[in-house]
Image (cartoon, grey):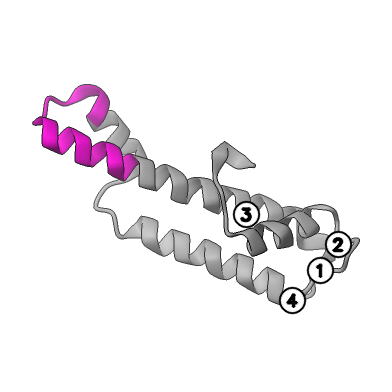
Amino acid sequence: RSGGVRLPDELERGLDALARGGDEGVRVDTLAAARGFRDACRRQAGVFPETLESDERALAHDEMPTWRRHALRVRVGELRLLEGAIGRIDAALTRAEPYSVN
C-alpha cells in the first residue's frame, strides 16, 4: 500500500485484482469505481485553498498562532491522504490498462 493509505475494502480487492494482471478478469464496474473514487479524491483536494507543497512550506517557515499551525497540520494530513489515494489508484489503473475494457 502506498504511503499507508487505506482505501475502502471493496476497492482494495478490486485494485489488487487489477494489479495481478486481470487473471481473475477485469470488470468494467471495478475500473469505473476506481476512476470514480479517484475523481472524488481529486475534487476534494481541489477545494483546499492551498496546495500540499505550499502548506508544507508555510509550516516549515512561517510564524503563526498555535491554532493556525494545528489547523494547517490537519489540512496537510488530509491532503496527504487524498494524494496518496490518488497515487495508489493511478498506479493500479496504469498496471491494469493492458487488461481493461473501455
Disc 4 secondary structure class: helix
Marks 1 and 4 close (CB-CB < 8 Å): yes
Disc 1 secondary structure class: loop
Query: In terms of depth relative to the viewer, which is nearer, 10 or 23?
Result: 10
**67 in magenta:** yes
Query: In terms of depth relative to the viewer, which is nearer, 86 or 94?
Result: 86
Q: Quadrant of residue 62?
A: top left
Disc 3 versus disc 2: nearer the observer = 2
Q: Which residue is mark 1?
A: 26
| Left or right of residue 46, residue 93 in this image | right
Q: Residues within 10 Å of mark 2 (few under 14, many from 20)?
A: some
Marks 2 and 1 close (CB-CB < 8 Å): yes
Task: Report the span colored magenta.
Answer: 59-76
Q: Which residue is mark 2?
A: 22
- Sequence-wise, which precedes: disc 4 or disc 2? 2
**Where does the N terminus fall, quadrant-wise?**
top right
Which circle marks residue 73 in the picture?
Answer: none
